[in-house]
Structure formats: structure tokens, C-alpha cells
Image (cartoon, grey):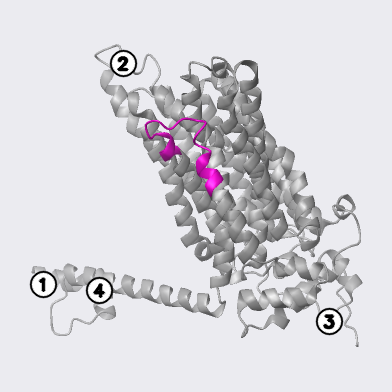
């Protein structure tokens, strides 16, 4: 059989020949490649057309603007997180500061400690002041903290470190407020079809803040007490735009019986051609299920405590993954890695900051296509593998495997450096493209409206408590088990996180906040692993309010179905 006959008998050629007729010309691999490329371009064009249509249908520009303004706080969030990386080496080389070398752990841990303290207060502010005013309030602790850090240069002797720590504490308080308030605000103003896209901006701004402060930190002459000028400038812009050009969320307005105000905000957010009455009815039905009980009494009910427990677990896994330890000590980790040398600050900035920005942009593109649950599973696996790879790097980088003083083994040092860099890049990319923003997005989606503010405060407290414990124990634990032991611990934690998401977290992509709540109004059927929400929501308008609030929506486990009423 000649070559022509072999080609005609190839199943791959036959398949593509049916899909793409040759039109009188022999089918070659080059033509197959061109046809496949045209098909991919056509698919991307169709997706872009669908996205533009969805954007236009949801009148998304006002939502996008409100989200962008709110996320200026997220930029400050990232700056406060990334500030320690350029500041600690600068403080350690300052001749007037001699005691910071022994207290760098406290310097780093004051941020998560402040965020932990502000967590419960965040819930109170969100419910009492509203989502919009709570966001405005977030700028106050940030401003106080950065001003105190700038004033440390004017103090001498014993007053220096306390003022520095207090400033770090207040920036942590601002992080705690914004960590809960920004996702809650964005989730409530966004349409369900684009909610993942808009909440994904939170992660991008946090990552951009970390990269921004680290890039400014490597500029010659940039010192720790002048770096706060950058975040203070962004806070001024935020206060002006947020106070004058954005509005309260319609769900909070309607919950506080400001029906006309909620309608006006919905018309501004969705456009005058949108069916505002339908969304207001859905919100009203959800509000009708609220129990007139305090926060602790509401937690007796499964529809409240179960999503709250899921949110607390997600944020704990997020912080225990070790990302803040890697961010705060990135320059230290890279400077101790043999073979990197004097370029540790530049390499750590590019690796940690750059990969987080790229990962956050990837989250923005993928979250509404692949869903929250799938991204958490995939990126959790990436983080698990890369943390284990970093642990292996430290094993082989230690004596007697690679001794830089031994000429016979010195080549091993340079061979292992790419492993460390690639591992950190994959690790931070995996975090930024899922675990950075999605735990708070999923929590804001799962929590019922009547405990959303207080619940987010509890979840924020739990997450930052985990971060505080991790940062305070990171260096002692690393000394006890060696660096490779610490990274293997992070790998095991992420393995547990992947198992947890697979077993317990439902998919919320494309569901309205009211539809998501119905998932927790029913009991889980025995021996049934529920991971997807029901496609068709149960109609609430046909049933008694008391029946709905008693969660008698399904007939699982012998619970009788609801009875229809005649109005």
C-alpha cells in the first residue's frame, strides 16, 4: 500500500475529512491544523459574542463601576499584606533599629491579629450601617495605621516599636473589615450571571496591591516609612468616589423596608428595561423567611449554621495553606535558597507578586465558566503538589546532598534553584486563581440574607485567627521540623482542603442568592452526596411563610410536602 492509500485509511484523516471536506484538494496535516485553528477561533468568537450579550442584557456597566470603586479597598488589602516583604529587610538594616530582628514574627503577625479582632465587628457594621456605609468605614483604620507607620521615623528609643506595631495592627483591622465587606457588597449588587466575574476583581486587586508595594520596595531609596504614601493616595481616591458616586445594595435597603429606594437602586444597576418587580419579589420571599431571633438563636437552624460552618472551614483552609507565610517571608525564603544569591528581593517580587496577578486574572476569566467548586478542586491540587515539591527542594538542598562548599556537588545547587522558583510560582498562582477570593465569594453566596453580615464577620474572624496562629508558629515550627517539614505540612493541609470541597461544597455558579438558600432549606437525603444545587427552584409564593421557615420544602426523610393555600 503506498503512502496515499495509507493516508486515506487513517481514521484521524477520515474523521476530519467528514468534518472538513477537501474540496478537490488532498487532505494534509497542515490543512487539518488550519481547520482546527479556524474552529477554535470561531469558538472563541462565539463565546465573546455570548459574553457581550450577557453583559448588555444585565446592563453591567454600573455594577462594574461600583465593583471597581469598592475594590480600591482590596488594593489596600494587598498593599498591607505585601508591606512586610520589603519592610522587614529594610528595618533589619536600619542602624537605629536593633530589636526588630528578634521581633519580626510579631511585626508580621500584627496584621492577621488586627483582622481577627475586627472580624466580628464587621458583621455588626454590615447589618447596622449597611453595606455601603460599612465600606466607607473601612478606610478609617487603614488611614490611621499607615499614618502611624509614617510617624515612627519621628520617634526614638522605646517608642519606636510600639508605634510600629500599633500601625500594623490598625492596617490589619482595615484588612478584616474589607475582607468581609467588599465581597458582601459586590455579591449583593451583581447579577447572578456575572457575579463570579465581578467578585473575581477582589482577588485581582489584592494581588495587584501585593505586587505594587513590592515593586515600589525594590526601588533604590524606598524606605519603610515612606512606603505608606502609596496606600494613603488610594484611600483618598476611594473616599471621594465611594461617597459621591455609588449606592447602597438593594437587598439591604429592602430588608430595612426602604422599598422605593431598593427599586431605584435596582433600576440604576440593571437598567430601566429590566424586570425589577421579579427580583424584588425574590428578595421579599427570602426576607419573609427571616426569624425574629438574635444571631446565636438563629444558628440553631440548619439553614443558618450549616453554610456558616462551610464558610469557616473554607477560610481556615485558605489561611492555613501557608500563603501569608510565603508572602511575608518571600524574600527571606529566597535569600536562604542556595544559588539565588543577592537577587532574592527581585526574584521573589517577580515570582510571588507576578504569579498572583496572573492567577487573579485567570480567576476572572474562568470562574463563571468552570464554576467555583471545580476551580477550588483543581487549584487546591496544584497547591498541594507544588508545596510538596518545595519540600523536596529543601530536602535535596540540605547537606550532604548539595554542599556549595564542595566543588563536586556545587552543580546540584544551581540545578535545584529552578525547582524552588517553579514551585513558588505554581503555588501562588494556584492560590490567586481560586483560593484567594473564592472562599469569601462562596461564603457570601451560601449565607442566608438575615445572617449574612454577622456570618461574614464570624467567618472573617475564623480565617484570620488561623492566619495569626500560623504566622506566630511558622518560624518556631520551621526550626523544629526544618523548612521541608513546614512545606510538607502545607501540602497535607491542601490535600485535606481538596477532600473537604469535594465532599461538602455545592456548586453555586449561575444561581441567584435566593435560589442558593433553598439548598439549605431541605435536609440531605440519607446516603446521598449532594454536590449540585437543584436546577429548578421551588416556588415560594404558593406556600405559607411558616411552612417555608420550618424548611418543609421537600419530602425527604418522611417530612410531609407543603400544602398549597388559597388566597
Percent position of residue 521, x then y: 79, 64
Write down the residue under mark 2: 404
Kind of element beneath mark 4 = helix
Q: Is residue 284 magenta?
A: no
Mark 4 is surrounded, within 10 Å at the Cα level, by few (under 14), some (14 to 19) or many (20 or more) other residues, namely some
Q: Secondary structure at mark 3?
A: loop
Earlier-in-chain disc, 2 versus 1:
1
Q: Is residue 317 left or right of residue 284?
A: left
Q: Which residue is mark 1?
A: 4
Q: Residue at x 73, y 82 (%)?
A: 277
Q: Mark 2 or mark 4: which comes first in sequence?
A: 4
Q: For mark 4, what is the residue?
A: 35
Where residue 441 sits: x, y (%)?
A: 63, 56
Tell whether label 3 touches label 1 (CB within 8 Å): no
Q: CA distance from mark 4 to mark 1?
A: 21 Å
Disc nearer the start of the sequence (3/4): 4
Q: Is residue 221 above or below residue 458?
A: above
Label 3, residues with CA under 10 Å away: few <14, some 14-19, many ≥20: few
Give the structural element (helix, strand or loop) at label 2. Answer: loop
The residues bearing labels 1 and 3 have C-alpha atoms spaced at a distance of: 69 Å
Label 2 Cα crowd, 10 Å radius (few <14 / some 14-19 / many 20+): some
Amino acid at each position: 500500500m503506498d503512502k496515499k492509500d495509507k493516508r486515506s485509511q487513517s481514521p484521524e484523516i477520515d474523521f476530519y475529512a467528514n468534518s472538513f471536506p477537501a474540496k478537490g484538494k488532498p487532505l494534509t496535516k497542515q490543512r487539518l491544523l488550519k481547520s482546527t485553528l479556524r474552529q477554535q477561533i470561531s469558538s472563541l468568537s462565539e463565546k465573546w459574542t455570548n459574553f457581550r450579550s450577557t453583559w448588555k442584557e444585565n446592563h453591567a456597566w454600573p455594577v462594574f463601576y461600583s465593583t471597581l470603586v469598592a475594590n480600591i479597598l482590596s488594593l489596600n488589602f494587598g498593599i498591607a499584606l505585601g508591606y512586610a516583604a520589603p519592610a522587614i529587610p529594610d528595618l533589619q538594616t536600619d542602624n537605629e533599629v536593633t530589636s526588630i530582628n528578634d521581633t519580626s514574627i510579631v511585626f508580621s503577625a500584627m496584621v492577621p491579629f488586627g483582622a481577627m479582632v475586627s472580624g466580628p465587628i464587621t458583621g455588626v457594621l454590615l447589618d447596622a450601617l449597611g453595606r455601603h456605609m460599612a465600606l466607607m468605614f473601612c478606610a478609617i483604620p487603614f488611614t490611621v495605621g499607615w499614618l502611624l507607620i509614617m510617624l515612627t521615623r519621628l520617634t526614638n528609643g522605646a517608642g519606636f516599636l510600639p508605634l510600629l506595631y500599633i500601625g500594623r495592627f490598625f492596617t490589619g483591622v482595615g484588612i478584616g473589615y474589607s475582607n468581609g465587606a467588599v465581597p458582601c457588597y459586590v455579591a449583593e449588587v451583581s447579577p447572578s450571571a456575572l457575579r463570579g466575574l465581578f467578585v473575581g476583581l477582589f482577588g485581582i486587586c489584592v494581588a495587584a496591591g501585593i505586587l505594587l508595594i513590592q515593586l515600589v520596595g525594590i526601588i533604590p531609596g524606598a524606605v519603610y516609612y515612606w512606603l505608606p504614601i502609596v496606600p494613603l493616595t488610594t484611600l483618598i481616591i476611594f473616599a471621594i468616589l465611594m461617597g459621591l458616586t455609588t449606592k447602597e445594595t438593594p437587598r439591604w435597603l429592602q430588608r430595612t423596608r426602604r422599598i422605593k429606594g431598593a427599586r431605584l437602586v435596582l433600576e440604576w444597576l440593571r437598567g430601566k428595561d429590566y424586570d425589577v418587580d421579579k427580583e424584588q419579589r425574590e428578595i421579599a420571599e427570602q426576607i419573609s423567611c427571616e426569624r425574629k431571633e438574635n444571631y446565636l438563636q438563629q444558628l440553631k437552624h440548619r439553614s443558618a449554621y450549616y453554610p456558616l460552618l462551610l464558610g469557616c472551614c473554607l477560610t481556615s483552609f485558605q489561611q492555613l495553606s501557608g500563603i501569608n507565610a510565603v508572602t511575608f517571608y518571600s524574600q527571606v525564603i529566597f535569600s536562604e535558597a542556595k544559588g539565588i544569591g543577592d537577587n532574592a528581593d527581585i526574584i521573589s517580587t517577580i515570582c510571588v507578586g507576578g504569579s498572583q496577578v496572573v492567577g487573579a486574572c485567570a480567576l476572572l476569566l474562568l470562574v463563571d465558566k468552570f464554576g467555583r467548586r471545580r476551580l477550588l478542586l483543581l487549584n487546591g491540587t496544584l497547591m498541594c503538589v507544588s508545596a510538596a515539591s518545595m519540600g523536596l527542594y529543601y530536602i535535596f538542598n540540605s547537606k550532604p546532598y548539595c554542599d556549595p562548599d564542595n566543588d563536586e556537588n556545587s552543580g546540584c545547587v544551581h540545578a535545584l534553584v529552578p525547582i524552588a522558583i517553579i514551585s513558588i510560582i505554581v503555588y501562588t498562582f494556584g492560590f490567586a486563581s481560586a483560593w484567594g477570593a473564592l472562599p469569601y465569594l462562596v461564603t457570601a453566596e451560601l449565607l442566608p440574607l438575615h445572617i449574612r453580615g454577622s456570618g461574614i464577620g464570624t467567618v472573617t474572624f475564623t480565617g484570620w485567627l488561623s492566619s495569626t496562629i500560623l504566622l506566630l508558629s511558622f518560624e518556631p515550627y520551621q526550626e523544629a521540623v526544618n523548612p521541608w517539614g513546614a512545606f510538607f505540612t502545607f501540602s497535607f493541609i491542601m490535600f485535606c482542603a481538596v477532600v473537604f470541597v469535594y465532599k461538602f461544597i455545592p456548586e453555586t455558579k449561575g444561581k441567584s442568592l435566593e435560589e442558593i438558600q433553598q439548598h439549605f432549606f431541605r435536609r440531605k437525603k440519607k446516603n446521598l452526596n449532594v454536590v449540585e444545587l437543584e436546577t429548578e427552584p421551588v416556588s415560594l409564593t404558593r406556600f405559607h411563610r411558616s411552612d417555608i421557615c420550618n424548611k418543609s420544602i421537600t419530602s425527604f426523610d418522611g417530612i410531609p410536602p407543603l400544602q398549597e393555600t388559597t388566597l
